[in-house]
Amino acid sequence: MNIKVYHSAEEIGKAAAAVFAAQVITKPASVLGLATGSSPVPTYRRLIELYQEGIVDFSQTVTFNLDEYIGLSKDHPCSYHAFMQENLFSCINVKPENIHIPSGDSDETQGASYDCAIQEAGGIDLQILGIGNNGHIAFNEPQDTFTMGTHIISLTESTIEANARFFESREEVPRQAISMGIGSIMRARRILLIATGKAKAEAVYRMAKEEVSPMCPASILQLHPDATIMVDEEAAAMLS
Ligand code: F6R
């Protein structure tokens, strides 16, 4: 695990977007693993600029998102489908048929087909991740064991609390989500995890410095051969 400290979220966005751009330039049909939430937004913003400047072409790129809320339709404004359209897909030339996001319906069987689709696409070349205040990656919440495949999970109180900011009220936050499992994430050839702000400092410390444990799912990244943790000074505060 390689940890890099930056001065701001914008600086991280530029650096992460440069890694994504290089990936797509050197392999146009790259398979990109994408996340939602606040952490990847500066990266997506910079990638859109690079596309508009004619530097990156996403016409052959395939994408797989990490997760979606159960019970929200694709066009619900708080769904991750809507988030991705607004923050990235509507502004670049990725083909709609190359975009994959788990569905918000409660069909358990879609997990296995989602994992198969990732494998059939050749596996994820580059995965972007955020980290929850409780150490989750995607919606792999702290629990007794790591779950390898894409699965439906009940969100913890900490995640519901943290994500309430995207909804009108806490009550509106869905209680369940479908999430890519630890297996597909760990099989990604390269991972960038972004964490900013002091609320992430403890999770970053537990991920990087404590023993690998499903109680802090992000700690599994200690065992990944090419994981870079991109943090600002606040998120890095407990590391030194
Ligand atoms: C989102 C996701 C989550 C977030 C995490 C951090 O697709 O998988 O794990 O990355 O909850 O969220 P932010 O970036 O909003 O702090």
Image (cartoon, rainbow, N blue to C red):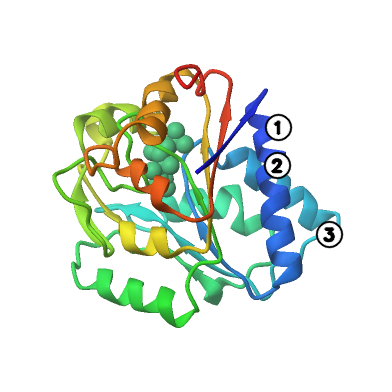
| Location of residue 165 with respect to 79 vertically, above or below | above
Label 1 or label 3, whichever lies nearer to me, is: 1
Tell me: is circle 2 under 8 Å from ligand 1: no
Q: CA distance from mark 3 to mark 2?
A: 15 Å
Query: Which residue is labeled 2 in the image?
Result: 15
Q: Which residue occupies 36% across, 54% down?
A: 67
Amino acid type, label 2: Ala
Q: Secondary structure at mark 2?
A: helix
Q: CA distance from mark 2 to mark 1?
A: 6 Å
Amino acid type, label 3: Ile
Q: Residues within 10 Å of mark 1 (few under 14, many from 20)?
A: some
- Res. 117 image quadrant: bottom left
Q: Residues within 10 Å of mark 3 (few under 14, many from 20)?
A: few
**Left or right: 54, with 69 as reference point:** right
Q: Which residue occupies 50% across, 78% down?
A: 122
**Whole-percent x and y of residue 22?**
74, 59
Query: Which residue is labeled 3 in the image?
Result: 55
Q: CA distance from mark 1 to mark 3?
A: 19 Å
**Whole-percent x and y of residue 224?**
44, 54
Q: Is residue 79 visible?
A: no
> Mark 2 and 1 residues: CB-CB less than 8 Å, in contact?
yes
Amino acid type, label 1: Glu
Q: Is residue 82 visible?
A: yes
**Left or right: 42, with 77 as reference point:** right
Outermost left residue: 144
- Along the viewing direction, whichever of 23 and 3 lies nearer the viewer: 3
**Whole-percent x and y of residue 152?**
21, 57
Query: Which residue is labeled 1 in the image?
Result: 11
Q: Secondary structure at mark 1?
A: helix
- Along the viewing direction, whichever of 26 and 222 lies nearer the viewer: 222
